[in-house]
Image (cartoon, helix red, strand yellow):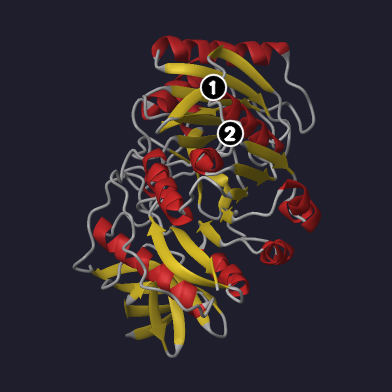
Amino acid sequence: MSRKRNKDRQIIENVSIEAVAAEGNGLAHIDGKVLFVPKCVPGDVVNVQITRSRKGFMQGSVLKLVKESPMRQKPFCPHYGVCGGCTWQALPYSKQLEFKQQQVEDQLTRIGHLNLPPISPILGSEHIQDYRNKLEYTFSDRRWILAEERFNPDGSEREFGAEELVGLGFHIPQMFSKVLDIKECRLQKEPSNAIRLFVRNYALRHGLGFFDLYRHTGFLRNLMIRSNTAGEFMVNLVIGTPSVGASPSEEDISKAKALLGALVEKFPGTVSTYLIINNKANDSYDGCPLIHVSGSPFITEKMEDITFRIGPKSFYQTNSEQAYRLYCKVREFAALSGTEVLYDLYTGTGTIALFLAKNAAKVIGIEYVEEAVADARTNALDNNVDNAEFFAGDMKDVLSDEFIAEHGKPDTIILDPPRAGIHPSVAQVILRASPTRMVYVSCNPATQARDLQILCGQYRITRVQPVDMFPHTQHVENIVLLEKC
């Protein structure tokens, strides 16, 4: 291993990648420091340019792959290495599962310092391509230009026409204003790719402007494609406005509706379309007006005897098949007999609550997003579930000793919080409620470990089950069963 200096940046040659870090980066040790390097596989030998150096760690980028790891495989996606998704494609799926299993164990023990039972083998995804039911794309009037595109064969700098500069795709990692124009994505079943390409080409043929991410102005802003296991599609087209806070013209609305009309004619499996007007400086759809353009107001997904409506703003687990396996495991851990009061905290659109309702006497769901709670109540009505109630509000404000006194002491609590985990005050209310058992579902084992450390003063962990919801990424879901000491 050798070191060089290049334009004030250090280069380290022949770095041996030892493992995969929790964030999905390759990990090595250099002179007592940990070095994190993206897009590496354990066993790779690489030349690395250091991009950041702190007291205990360094970050770098690969300049050259000197020697490939025996476990490295050819990525299946043509955009691998530039697009920010599916960063573990170079790892065989069996190895991905091994690393995710180890990640769960490391974070629960090193962060939470928890006493654990044997961790169950991770539940892998049956499908590792075409598994997502939702993708969101961004329009850009100045797409990311790839290095190999910049020059002509004679070495001169290439000039691009206006139509060559636009893009419809994903944001480049850590560069929100840069969008990679996607030719093919293997995350959602066809005709997802065909729909995206049709929209892009239609926009160019009809002179529809793409969004300016710097000035937050422009016409076509985002494209969301949702699907269900029945093969039906919902397409949501998001348009911008001439300036932040402004309203679109009737002409622009007509043009957007015409695009969606042409799309439905081309792809009859598109059973629902919406127009969303976003005049904000961010991409959040909260508070944005919706115009239902065609077809059904929703698509549906079925789990056993429960049918869920999925609208343009609904939250639903993006890997439908794995979500079912996860919910079955939650039901197994909850071990309900039919007499319990069940609290489902961070209930979303009530998917877990409704899935378990027939096994409980009473279900209480709490969720921050009011639109999600409205969906949960509608889903309860549609499925004739009359023992579930849903409440909207910030968890630390809604879940109180008074709330529990009014609605009943929980025998069992399901926790499925966002990545940040649960608020300390929520943990204290839960401890005072003292349910017999809790099932904690987390998409972030690090914050889960922190929360479990608080809860384990009165509870013991009896089962741990990792679940892979997102193949080819570093993300892992984890289920923990806690029982009263």
Q: Nearer the viewer, residue 9 or 304?
A: 304
Element at label 2:
loop
Q: Quadrant of residue 410?
A: bottom right
Q: Is the residue 330 above or below the residue 72 in the image?
A: above
For the C terminus, give its image quadrant. Answer: bottom right
Return the x and y of residue 28 as percentages of the image width and height. 38, 79
Q: Nearer the viewer, residue 321 or 120?
A: 120
Three-letter amino acid code at disc 2?
Ser
Measured as percent of width and height from the top left, residue 51 is found at 51, 71
Residue type pointed to by label 1: Phe
Q: Are marks 1 and 2 in contact (CB under 8 Å)?
A: yes
Which residue appears farthest toward the bottom when viewing the image?
A: 31
Q: Which mark is residue 298?
A: 1
Q: Between disc 1 and disc 2, whose residue precedes?
A: 1
Q: In terms of depth relative to the viewer, which is nearer, 73 or 23?
A: 23
The front one of 245 and 381 is 381
Residue in view at x 58 percent, y 43 percent: 361
When the figure is inspected, residue 439 is found, relative to residue 462, above or below; the finding is above
Q: CA distance from mark 1 to mark 2?
A: 9 Å
Give the numbered dot on residue 314: 2
Which residue is at a point 48% across and 54% down the rendered structure image? 334
Q: Residues within 10 Å of mark 2 (few under 14, many from 20)?
A: some
Q: Is residue 101 left or right of residue 394?
A: left
Q: State which quarter of the image contains the N terminus.
A: bottom left
> Residue 300 at x, y = what percent?
47, 25
- Residue at (35%, 50%) from the top-left corner? 80
- Considering the numbered disc 1 on the image, is that residue within a helix, a strand or a loop? loop
Task: Describe residue 280's horizontal placement relative to residue 24 as left or right.
Answer: right
Whether residue 10 is visible, yes or no, is no
